[in-house]
Image (cartoon, grey):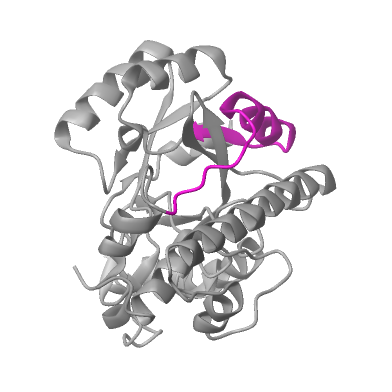
Amino acid sequence: MENDVEASNIIDGAKPEVHGRCDLHTHTQASDGMQPPAENVRIARHKGLAAVAITDHDTVSGVAEALEAGLKYGITVVPGVEISTRAEGKEIHVLGYYIDTHQELFLSRLAEQRDTRAKRNASIIGKLRGLGINITLDNVVAGIGRELKPDESIGRPHIADELVRLGAAADMREAFDKYLATGAAAYVSPPRITPELACEWIIEAGGTPVLAHPGIYGDDELVRGILTRSSLRGIEVYHSDHTPADEERYLEMAEEFGLVVTGGSDFHGARQGVIFHGDLGSVTVSADVLERLKG
């Protein structure tokens, strides 16, 4: 399947057949993705998808542009978000679909989340400098190559990019493994809201909360506890980092808890020639799931 760079060279007028599949987990420049929101939509249309969700970290600032692009390219855009939470010492992500992206209360709550992310970033930079790496947040922002909007935020991939530029890591994978991943030398996990509270926020904003990539957490007892305690309505069974065994287990959990089965690539674009986590459209579910998420 073409990567995002190749897809960007396709003539916009191309109209491949739509096969009724959707990628429900993609990121844009509004958080830590590489593509403008409209480009995610165009790539999805080129790849024959019926729908694509925009699920940036703790912000919905890319949704409006994506919705407009959806009209242009004739593809359904699902307004979404991915909220960072914490449970039993682990960072847990909760996806929200079909939220009201104009609700002032929800927007203010997301702004608080981004403030937490900004404090975390400052702590990470401090740890890296303590390790003798001459990195600054200003240089991280400069490396992005554009001015950030007020409701956009810096993510660990941006910091990893700068570590590679400085020669402190050979590539993105080493940057995470050595410095930024859970338990690594500069890892920071600030206090966050609970998954249960994130679900409440999403529901109050008219949306549907879904547990993101449970296989990444490496603790199915924790996952089961979150499903039991929270008002989650779906679980991301299919994800770029899930194995077939993961999919089988989470399908069983979905049936047990009566949850909507979702899936997506968790596309962030290409950094140093490597696509994280997966290419847009590489992990999909039937577009039929959208009606259940709207409910």
Q: Quadrant of the C terminus?
A: top right
Instruction: Tell me if 182 is positioned left or right of 215 in this view.
Output: right
Instruction: Tell me if 152 is positioned left or right of 133 in this view.
Output: right
Where in the figure is residue 264, as x and y percent of width and height? Answer: 36, 48
Q: Quadrant of residue 238?
A: top left
Residue at the (58%, 49%) spot, across then down: 81
Where in the figure is residue 87, as x and y percent of width and height? Answer: 52, 26
Camera-nearest residue between 264 and 93 = 93
Where in the figure is residue 140, as x and y percent of width and height? Answer: 53, 75
- The boundaries of the magenta stretch are 186-210
| Residue 201 to residue 130: above or below | above
Q: Is residue 255 visible?
A: yes
| Residue 237 to residue 51: above or below | above
Residue 105 part of the magenta segment = no
| Residue 261 to residue 144: above or below | above
Q: Quadrant of residue 138?
A: bottom right
Residue 188 part of the magenta segment = yes
Instruction: Tell me if 171 is positioned left or right of 294 in this view.
Output: left
Where in the figure is residue 96, as x and y percent of width and height? Answer: 57, 40
**Total marks drawn?**
0
Residue at the (56%, 83%) spot, across then down: 142
